Amino acid sequence: VRPLPLAAAAVAAPRTALRLLGRGLAAAMSTAGPLKSVDYEVFGRVQGRHPPTYTEDEAKKIGVVGWVKNTSKGTVTGQVQGPEEKVNSMKSWLSKIGSPSSRIDRTNFSNEKTISKLEYSNFSIRY
């Protein structure tokens, strides 16, 4: 019995998806249109139990790369890179939502620019 062409395509499709996943987030994002990079600093009651962990989780959920860290002056700073619409989603989260225990007074964004490729392969917490 010969497999139907449609059945063969259905079997091959998951392999293709896995191959794309294997190339990583950075490779997938590099084909998603214009890439943006932006630095940020969040002011307010933004350090405490685990704000960088929440930021890392949200960045991964949205699909951006970069980093976050607590500063000695009580702010949270970092950089976000990815497709423009995803970077904008992360900017909104950083300025309006944040971690559950935070109170955001303001968020400053700087050095926003279009980039040709991502400088990071994931989103990480810096210490």
Image: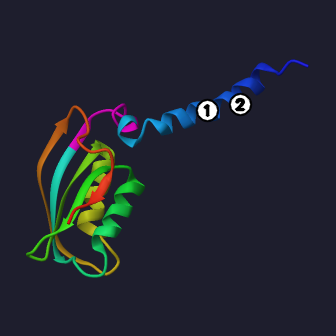
Is 110 situated left or right of 16 in this image? left
Q: Amino acid at mark 1?
A: Arg
Q: Residue at x 26, y 39 (%)?
A: 118
Dots 2, 1 in contact, CB < 8 A: yes
Query: Label 2: which residue?
Result: 11
What is the secondary structure assignment of the residue under circle 1?
Answer: helix
* Residue 100 lies in quadrant: bottom left
Q: Residue at x 49, y 34 (%)?
A: 20
Q: Residue at x 16, y 59 (%)?
A: 40
The mark found on residue 72 in the picture is: none
Which quadrant: the N terminus? top right
Give, as a single range, the part of the protein colored magenta. 28-36
Q: In the image, residue 70 lies at what x, y percent?
A: 18, 70
64 up-or-down from 18: above or below: below
105 up-or-down from 39: above or below: below
Give the distance between the C-alpha atoms of the residues marked 2 and 1, in whole angstroms. Answer: 8 Å
Which quadrant: the C terminus? bottom left
Q: In the image, residue 61 lies at what x, y percent?
A: 42, 56
Q: Amino acid at mark 2?
A: Val
* Residue 17 lies in quadrant: top right
